[in-house]
Amino acid sequence: MLWRDAMAAGEASYTVSPWQGATPVFETLDTTGKTWRLADLKGRAVLINFWASWCEPCRAEMPTLQQIADLYGPDKLLVLALNYKEHPRRAIQFAATTGLSLPVLLDSQGQTAGAWGVKVFPTTVLIDRQGRPRQRVQGEVDWTGAPAAQLIAALLAY
């Protein structure tokens, strides 16, 4: 079933699963040249959203990711938008035209997505304040909705 069909049928367009296995290395550059490392982010919950501008569900969920980032603030919940295998200009253009102010990270070769087992777009990995991945969410989520709020509340409780 296509995600649009699932949405029309009122079914969830995403799946949530517990993280399994070791934590992969996470070290990547953003569009400004800043290096982001998971180890440097301890003390706050993190959502790493793997997306691409050609992905319709990615584009649809991005405004709600921005809204929750604004709601919680980066000291409590940091939302990172990791662009998959696109030219940095394309990622920057997408952020500019959509008003996105989240940090946009670059995965130009797809190595980070591969290391994190990302095969579906969008995929969001929820990481607790100790830097441990807790859950993987595959598919489009309304991050301002009640089910997502429960995911975030549980993440913040760790």
Image (cartoon, rainbow, N blue to C red):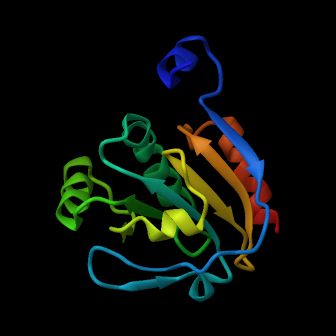
- State how many labels appear: 0
Tell me the residue at 70%/78% (across/down): 131
Can you say whether 12 is above or below 38 in the image?
Answer: above
* View extreme (top): residue: 9
Give the quarter of the figure containing the N terminus. top right
Is residue 43 toward the left or the right of residue 29 in the image? right
Q: Is residue 82 visible?
A: yes
Quadrant for residue 9, please give it: top right
Where is residue 4? Give x, y as percent: 47, 20
Where is residue 14? Give x, y as percent: 62, 35
Tell me the residue at 81%/64% (across/down): 157
Quadrant for residue 146, please give it: top right
Where is residue 150? Give x, y as percent: 75, 46
Can you say whether 104 is above or below 3 in the image?
Answer: below
Q: Is residue 79 visible?
A: no
Tell me the residue at 66%/83% (across/down): 42
Give the quarter of the figure containing the C terminus. bottom right
Can you say whether 87 is above or below 11 in the image?
Answer: below
Where is residue 53? Give x, y as percent: 30, 47
Is residue 60 toward the left or the right of residue 130 in the image? left
Between 142 and 81, the residue placed more toward the observer is 81
Tell me the residue at 60%/65% (across/down): 116
Between 37 and 150, the residue placed more toward the observer is 37
